[in-house]
Image (cartoon, helix red, strand yellow):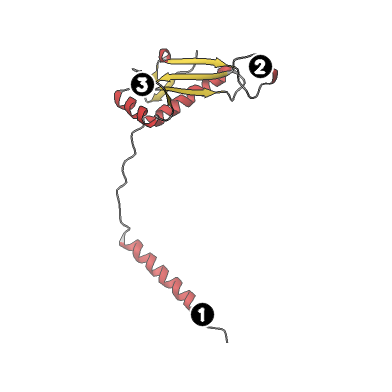
């Protein structure tokens, strides 16, 4: 049983919508790696999913358009660990992070502000003082 894939808040992807595939992994493991299917491929049909609210689904399809395969399927691979179990956890965490970032609301637009009069005056007086110091260093080569 793999860990649940939590998107944001209380939204969790049901196991029925996740497809797991296992294959031989290149990477650490020595002779063990030649005999065990430790690489994990997690597939999630984003376009056909009913687990996400419509607004989130639309936002995720738009933001992850470059990562989706034909038909709107999101594929995540993990092969950095020697055990299949840890690779399953890594793939689930990676999918969760991708989806939670994709469905996040857009950041609030920046409201332009002006520096206060005191800040402007302090900057100008410091600038003037620095210019006077530098001017005082000139022309003393007797």
Q: Nearer the viewer, residue 1 or 121?
A: 1
User: Which of disc 1 and disc 2 is earlier in sequence?
Assistant: 2
Label 1 sits on a secondary structure element that is loop
Mark 1, other Cα within 10 Å: few <14 / some 14–19 / many ≥20: few
- What's the distance in space between the residues labelled 3 and 2, CA to CA? 35 Å
- What's the distance in space between the residues labelled 3 and 1, CA to CA? 71 Å
Point 31% across, 23% down: residue: 53
Residue 23 at x, y = what percent? 57, 16
Q: Which residue is mark 1?
A: 138
Label 3 sits on a secondary structure element that is loop
Label 2 sits on a secondary structure element that is helix
- Asked whether the residues under the numbered discs 3 and 2 touch, taking CB atoms below 8 Å apart as contact, a structural biologist would say no
Q: Nearer the viewer, residue 136 or 65?
A: 65
Quadrant position of the C terminus in the picture: bottom right
Horizontal arrangement in the rendering, residue 115 relative to residue 133 (left or right): left
Number of dots carrying numbers: 3
Mark 3, other Cα within 10 Å: few <14 / some 14–19 / many ≥20: some
Q: Which residue in the rendered view is the most extreme toward the bottom?
A: 142
Q: Quadrant of residue 17?
A: top left
Q: Quadrant of residue 65?
A: top left
Q: Which residue is mark 3?
A: 47
Q: Nearer the viewer, residue 30 or 129?
A: 30
Q: Which residue is mark 2?
A: 34
- Asked whether the residues under the numbered discs 2 and 1 touch, taking CB atoms below 8 Å apart as contact, a structural biologist would say no
């Amino acid at each position: 049983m793999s860990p649940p894939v939590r998107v944001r808040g209380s939204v969790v992807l049901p196991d029925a919508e996740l497809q797991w595939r296992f294959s031989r992994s290149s990477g650490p493991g020595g002779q063990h790696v030649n005999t065990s299917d430790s690489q994990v491929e997690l597939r999630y049909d984003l376009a056909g999913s009913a687990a996400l609210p419509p607004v989130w689904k639309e936002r995720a399809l738009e933001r992850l358009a470059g990562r989706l395969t034909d038909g709107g399927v999101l594929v995540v691979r993990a092969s950095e660990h020697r055990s299949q179990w840890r690779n399953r956890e890594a793939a689930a965490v990676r999918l969760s992070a991708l989806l939670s970032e994709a469905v996040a609301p857009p950041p609030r637009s920046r409201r332009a502000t002006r520096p206060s009069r005191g800040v402007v005056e302090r900057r100008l007086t410091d600038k003037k003082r620095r210019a006077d110091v530098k001017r005082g260093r000139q022309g003393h080569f007797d």
